[in-house]
Image: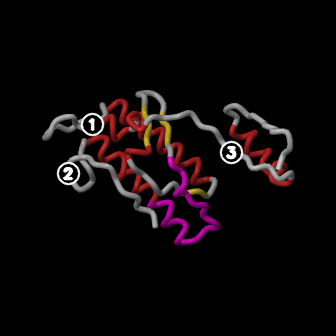
């Protein structure tokens, strides 16, 4: 472990952080990321949650399309790196009308090689985006066509 409380900061440069990891591991350092706090009341589920029975909220179409495109680009990027997200819930999506933030990457997995199973995981990830996020976002309903409610973990 480092002596004297040594700290290395990379600001918001995730690429430099990633590039330095091997050297830090060799020196016995335990790297971590400090992320900005995002209050759970700012996630898409809480923003869309109706405040009266029988009322449903949905994201305006133009914003929804922008969010969907950003999410699709993010999935495209991580899929090219062999990673599947797998935990698509409104509670994990933060949207301010312009910029998308996705949290809770602990269920993500690296998919090794090319196989039918790997292709299936990538397709499942895209399907989960459509069912778990986009359907609810555009309709204001859960995929079961009921009122929105927090979703339990679905990854085993």
> Within the image, what quadrant is residue 16 found in?
top right
Q: Nearer the viewer, mark 3 or mark 2?
A: 3
Nearest the viewer among 141 and 122 is 141
Q: Are marks 3 and 2 in contact (CB under 8 Å)?
A: no
Residue that lies at the very extreme toward the front in this rendered image: 4
Q: Where is residue 148 drawn, in percent x and y? A: 26, 46
| Residue under label 2 | 146
The span from disc 1 to disc 2 (Cα, nearest Å) is: 14 Å
Q: Nearer the viewer, mark 1 or mark 2?
A: 2
Crowd rating for badge 1 (residues with CA inside 10 Å; few <14, some 14–19, many 20+): some
| Residue under label 3 | 32
Q: Where is residue 104 drawn, in percent x and y? A: 51, 49
Residue under the point 30% across and 47% down:
135
Residue that lies at the very extreme toward the left in this rendered image: 54
In the picture, the disc for residue 58 is: 1
Q: Is residue 107 magenta?
A: yes
């Amino acid at each position: 472990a480092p002596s004297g409380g040594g700290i290395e900061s990379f600001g918001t440069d995730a690429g430099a952080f990633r590039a330095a990891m091997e050297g830090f591991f060799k020196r016995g350092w335990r790297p971590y990321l400090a992320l900005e706090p995002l209050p759970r009341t700012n996630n898409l589920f809480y923003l869309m949650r109706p405040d009266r029975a029988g009322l449903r909220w949905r994201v305006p179409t133009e914003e929804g399309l922008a969010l969907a495109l950003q999410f699709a680009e993010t999935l495209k990027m991580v899929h090219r790196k062999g990673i599947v997200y797998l935990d698509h819930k409104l509670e994990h999506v933060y949207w301010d009308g312009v910029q998308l933030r996705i949290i809770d990457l602990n269920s993500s997995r690296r998919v090794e090689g090319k196989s039918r199973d790997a292709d299936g995981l990538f397709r499942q990830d895209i399907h989960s985006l459509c069912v778990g996020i986009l359907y609810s976002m555009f309709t204001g309903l859960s995929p079961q066509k009921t009122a929105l409610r927090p979703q339990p973990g679905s990854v085993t």
